[in-house]
Image (cartoon, rainbow, N blue to C red):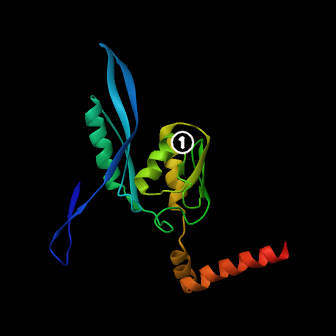
Amino acid sequence: MVQATDRHNKKEVKEELVERLVHVNRVAKTVKGGRTISFAAVVVVGDQKGRIGFGSGKAMEVPDAIVKATNEAKKNMIRIPLREGRTLHHDISGRFGAGKVVLRTAPAGTGVIAGGPMRAVFEVLGVQDVVAKSLGSNNPYNMIKATFDALKSINSPRMIAMKRGKKVGDIVSRRENGSKEVKEEA
């Protein structure tokens, strides 16, 4: 639980952050006297309302590695716009290294259809309906970074309206009218 103070009200506002351990890896380093064993951890942190971050940490003990990863994740949090607070605004793909992911919006009631590290990301982010597929590498580091690459490139109608200097209603209604015209032609 993180405590932040509101500048105007001078009250303490408590943020509920959900932490999810994604992967723990045992790493052995060979040195003159033998092997030194340490642990690497990957953690995803979010508030289930559109803010999310991930971090990795390495230490001689598992709990210390998890604490380091959690602290890094809290420092690197970003905000992702969600449609109706439950799904993504549009289909998107992301890539990092050999890891590729495809994220698709889904109607209400679908649930989170994603595997492994991507599932942890969506649960912590607060997405309730999404269909995701991992292509290429199944390395948890690459999958999480590819998922974040995709999430960072999501544009909400509000963001697009600001870029174009128009109102949100113009963009949303144009999209709906465009889909009706396509249906009439077919």
The correct choice, above or below, for 165 with respect to 57 in the image is below
Q: How many labels were placed on the picture?
A: 1
**Residue 146 percent location from the top left of the image:** 54, 49
Residue in the image at 23% along x and 57% along y: 2
Q: Quadrant of residue 153?
A: bottom right
Q: Quadrant of the C terminus?
A: bottom right
Q: Residue at x 49, y 39 (%)?
A: 140
Residue sitting at the far right: 186
Q: Quadrant of the N terminus?
A: bottom left
Q: Can you give x and y, in whole percent of width and height, for residue 69 in the image?
A: 33, 43
Which residue is more in the foreground, 27 or 155?
Answer: 155
Quadrant location of residue 170? bottom right
Q: Residue at x 60, y 41 (%)?
A: 98
Residue position marked by numbered label 1 in the rendering: 115
Give whichever of 8, 182 is nearer the camera: 182
The quadrant holding residue 62 is top left
Q: From this viewpoint, which residue is outermost toward the front?
A: 109
Amino acid at circle 1: Gly
Q: Secondary structure at mark 1?
A: loop
Residue at the extreme top of the image, as rendered = 33
- In the depicted view, which residue is nearer to us: 83 or 74? 83
Query: Residue 5: x percent and y percent?
Result: 19, 68
Mark 1 burial class by Cα count in 10 Å: few <14, some 14-19, many 20+: some
Q: Residue at x 55, y 81 (%)?
A: 161
x and y percentages locating residue 53 in the rendered image: 39, 53
